Amino acid sequence: MDTLLNPIHAFLGCKTPETWLAQAKRSENFAVLLIDHANCELKAAQTAMLLLRRYAVDKESGDALLAWLKPFEDFVYRKIGNGDFSQHISLSKKLINKSDFAHGDEMISKMVLLIKEELHHFQQVLEIMQSRDISYDNLTASRYAKGLMRCVRTHEPAKLIDTLICGAIIEARSCERFAAIAPFMEENISKFYVSLLRSEARHFEDYLSLAQQIATESIAPRVAFFIEKERQLVTLPDDQFRFHSGPVKEVLDYRVEHA
């Protein structure tokens, strides 16, 4: 585990605060943790799909990607289906690279594998929820991803480079939090979180590698910029507990507050 985590700890600007971990351990937050984890897996797949559709593949291939994710999105957002995605984990169609994007083949290779793994992880989290009779309730998104993406530049290729850097940071933080909370989970969930480390660690490296290949100069200054933004997002007080949130503001005891 240390072999996987050392590069991630060196990359991120901080470790998960102990105050967030204390809140993650609370039994009343267990369902929220699992539901939001499932949401994060689906959002990671959606992000990779959007990158492929926007930059790397032709329209027919883009339509195939939309169809691939549709059963998962129908289940989460429209409450359609029973949660069995065994027939939808893999993409059956070969994707066609746009001729005008030099890095298309590599992006397709990395992002298709990432989508497949994220969807598989989504299915695994859902199975854990179902085994504990945790319903897939709607949750509002945390400020985390939006807080990062708000700083993405709007012109190309800077927009793509920044988006890939944000993807790397989100994947790295996910990996770091899996490792941080695993010791406090039930044994089978703990083993599951540890099992996620290998793929999540590779995801962060794939995003960074693509960003540097597309850039004409070192991405180090932009990485440092987003790492600092991310540090603020995970360390400063937050309004709601989520998988990527900062520590939630504690509600003061009424008698203390009004003493």
Image (cartoon, helix red, strand yellow):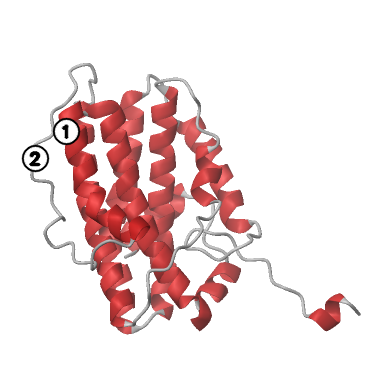
Residue drawn at x 42%, y 49% as measured from the top left: 170
In front: 33, or 176? 33
Tell me the amino acid under the disc marked 1.
Ser
Any part of residue 142 in sight: yes
13 versus 156 height, above or below: below
From the image, which quarter does the N terminus lie in? bottom left
The CA span between labels 2 and 1 is 8 Å
Q: Nearer the viewer, residue 187 or 129?
A: 129
Residue at coordinates 33% horizontally, 54% vertically from top-left?
42
Describe residue 176's horizontal placement relative to residue 227 as left or right: left
Residue, disc 1: 61
Q: Quadrant of the C terminus?
A: bottom right
Disc marking residue 133? none
237 relative position to 66: left or right: right
Task: Judge whether 193 appears above or below 59 on screen.
Answer: below
Q: Which residue is farthest top?
A: 100
Tag 1: Cα neighbours inside 10 Å, few (<14), some, or many (≥20)?
some
Q: Circle 2 sits on which residue?
A: 93
Q: Is the Cβ of the residue at disc 2 closer than 8 Å to that at disc 1?
A: yes
- Residue 243 location (% of width, % of height): 47, 63
Closer to the chain start, of discs 2 and 1, is 1
Viewer-closest of 195 and 31:
31
The answer to whether residue 190 is left or right of residue 99 is: right
Tell me if 116 is positioned left or right of 27 in this view: left
| Label 2 crowd bin: few (<14), some (14–19), many (20+), radius 10 Å | few
Query: Residue 50's quadrant in the figure?
Result: top left
Q: Which residue type does callout 2 highlight?
A: Lys
The structure residue drawn at horizontal position 44% and vertical position 24%, both measured from the top left corner, is 158
